[in-house]
Image (cartoon, rainbow, N blue to C red):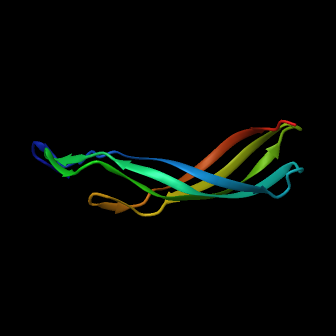
Amino acid sequence: MKTVGTSNNPGANFWSIGFLVNTYYDFFADKLFSPYVGVGIGFANVHMSSAKIINETKWSGDSDNVFAYQFGFGSGIKLDRYMTIDLGYRYNGTSEYNIDQVKTNFSGHNLILGLRYYIE
């Protein structure tokens, strides 16, 4: 929202860093196509910078530690004995965090393309 000569854009930055323990299960690990599913749990530190509207601070910056989780699925396509191309989807999120006047959660959808290399 804008008014003449002023801006109401609060300009706050949000970011998160987390640690999760994950487990994955490959259904047909020895086949050409190997579908998998996975889940993970852990914690995240969510940070929000301070924000001003028309040079007045509306909320101060702070951070919160919250429960984090993810789940995903995909398939590996075996290239040879040691390498597999991986195409997958992952959803990740957090429980509700409370920073100053903001109560919400983080979530994200990720499409993943990867290369696995196996060492014997």
Q: Residue at x 78, y 48 (%)?
A: 76
Q: Quadrant of residue 118?
A: top right
Position of residue 114 measured from the top left corner of the image (x, y, whole percent):
69, 41
Q: Residue at x 84, y 39 (%)?
A: 79
> How many numbered marks does the figure carry?
0
Q: Where 112 sits versus 91, above or below?
A: above
- Please state, as top left, top right, bottom left or bottom right, where the C terminus lies in the image: top right
- The one nearer the camera, 30 or 41, is 41
Answer left or right for 77 relative to 37. Answer: right
Q: Residue furthest left?
A: 4
Position of residue 49 measured from the top left corner of the image (x, y, whole percent):
30, 45
- The one nearer the camera, 111 or 16, is 16
Position of residue 37 measured from the top left corner of the image (x, y, whole percent):
72, 58
Q: Residue at x 55, y 49 (%)?
A: 19
Answer left or right for 93 relative to 76. Answer: left
Q: Quadrant of residue 36?
A: bottom right
Q: Residue at x 86, y 55 (%)?
A: 28
Answer left or right for 111 relative to 17. Answer: right
